[in-house]
Structure formats: structure tokens, C-alpha cells
Amino acid sequence: HAIKDVSVDIADKTVTAFIGPSGCGKSTFLRCINRMNDTIDVARIEGDILLDGEDIYDAKVDPVQLRARVGMVFQKPNPFPKSIYDNVAYGPKIHGMAKNKADLDDIVER
């Protein structure tokens, strides 16, 4: 187990910090909340994580939309395992900031 028996209530529209020694599971816990572990083939998830009463691992939950709602800041950059272009374009794309690929290309270049 990387982490086990964790239960925490986080109030809406608050900033919450997880503080602890290196290797204690802070980043692993945050990756679970944002479903970033979905990108790791060997990661195995057990249990439930509820956001507004809905299990974020339910098949009907879109991880892209979840990540738009759940923000995280890490000490070091933590890009998705994609190209630099895809990492820069990710935010503008999910928030509908570009009408077409040319607009998205312009945003990424800037």
C-alpha cells in the first residue's frame, strides 16, 4: 500500500495543504483525487473517493472534467506523459478557449 485508511473532508472553495515528510504519501493521495494515477499502468485503486457525493472513479465520471474542477499545485512540475504541446494545450482545450486547431496553436505558441 502506498496509502491506506485515509478519510478527509475538504470544504468547498478552500485551500488545503498536505504537509509531511518526503515519501509519506502526500503526492500519491493528491494524484488519486485528480485521477492522475489513471496514467500509470501499474497503479491499482481500491475504495471510493467522493466529490459532492459522487464516486470520482465511477465509469460515468470524465477524468478531464474532474481535473478541471480539482486543482493541484506540486513542488515540482508534474506534466502529463504527453508532448510539450499537449501539456500546454490541455488547459485551454478543456476550458474551450480555442475555436479550432489554429487558435489552439496560437495559444500554445504564445
Image (tube, grey):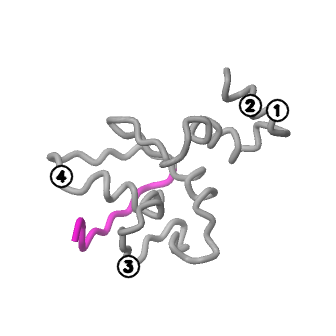
Q: CA distance from mark 1 to mark 4?
A: 42 Å
Q: At numbered mark 3, what does the secondary structure look like: helix, strand or loop?
A: loop
Question: Where 32 sits versus 83, above or below?
Answer: below
Looking at the picture, how far across and down is residue 26, in whole percent? 27, 53
Question: Where 40 sits versus 73, above or below?
Answer: below
Q: CA distance from mark 3 to mark 4?
A: 21 Å
Q: Residues within 10 Å of mark 4 (few under 14, many from 20)?
A: few
Q: CA distance from mark 3 to mark 1?
A: 42 Å
- Which residue bears the numbered disc 4? 23
Q: At numbered mark 1, what does the secondary structure look like: helix, strand or loop?
A: helix
Looking at the picture, how far across and down is residue 1, in whole percent? 22, 71
Mark 2 or 4, nearer chain start: 4
Identify the amino acid type marked 4: Gly
- Which residue bears the numbered disc 1? 102
Identify the amino acid type marked 1: Ala
Identify the amino acid type marked 3: Gly
**What stretch of residues is rendered in magenta?**
1-12
- Which residue bears the numbered disc 3? 47
Give residue 6's quadrant in the image.
bottom left
- Which residue bears the numbered disc 2? 105
